[in-house]
Image (cartoon, rainbow, N blue to C red):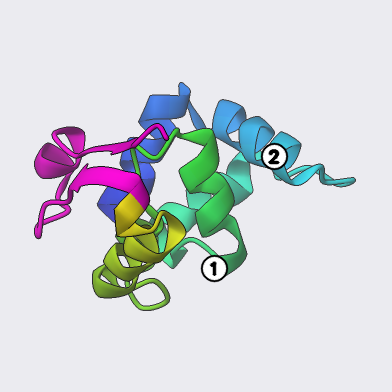
Amino acid sequence: MSEAIRKAIHMAGGAPNLARLVSDELDMEKPLTPMAVRQWVSRGVPGEYCIPLERVLKREILRHELRPDLYPPEEYELLLKVAVPSAERDCSLPTDLSAGNRKNHTCTEVQH
């Protein structure tokens, strides 16, 4: 978990940038501070920030990497299957959603 948030901070270009991105995504009146983001490394990411983090990082870090206790990988795979019905997609979903396999995942909608 702490490795995933470290990677997220690095991908965003630092804690200040990640704090701004998440605050903008959530349209927060009182934005996150860089210190709060840095504390996620040792304390864990609060659940309410996992999905916004996934969005602002363009799904390079997934919610279950940040909080597997709240978002088990099995549920994520099920969500993918439900979000786009199999009749409408050509999807090669790897059984292992580690970072290396996730990059090879392709899912395209079939045009009617």
Across and down, in percent, residue 93 comes to 17, 51
112 left or right, relative to 89: right
Across and down, in percent, residue 67 comes to 38, 67
Q: Quadrant of the N terminus?
A: bottom left
| Quadrant in which residue 6 is drawn | top left
15 left or right, relative to 59: right
Q: Is residue 98 magenta?
A: yes
User: Is residue 12 shown to the viewer in this render?
Assistant: yes
> 83 and 11: which one is in front?
83
Establish if 2 lies above or below 91. Answer: below
Q: CA distance from mark 2 to mark 1?
A: 15 Å
Q: Are marks 2 and 1 in contact (CB under 8 Å)?
A: no
Across and down, in percent, residue 39 comes to 51, 54
Q: Secondary structure at mark 2?
A: helix
Residue in view at x 35 percent, y 44 percent: 61
| Quadrant in which residue 84 is drawn | bottom left
Establish if 70 lies above or below 101. Answer: below
The magenta segment is 88-112
> 35 and 59: which one is in front?
59
Residue type beneath disc 2: Glu
Q: Residues within 10 Å of mark 2 (few under 14, many from 20)?
A: few
Residue position for label 2 = 25
Residue in view at x 39 percent, y 32 percent: 111
- Residue 47's disc is 1
Residue in view at x 34 percent, y 36 percent: 110
> 91 and 42: which one is in front?
91
Establish if 16 lies above or below 73. Answer: above
Number of the front mark, 2 or 1? 2
Q: Earlier in the sequence, mark 2 or mark 1?
A: 2
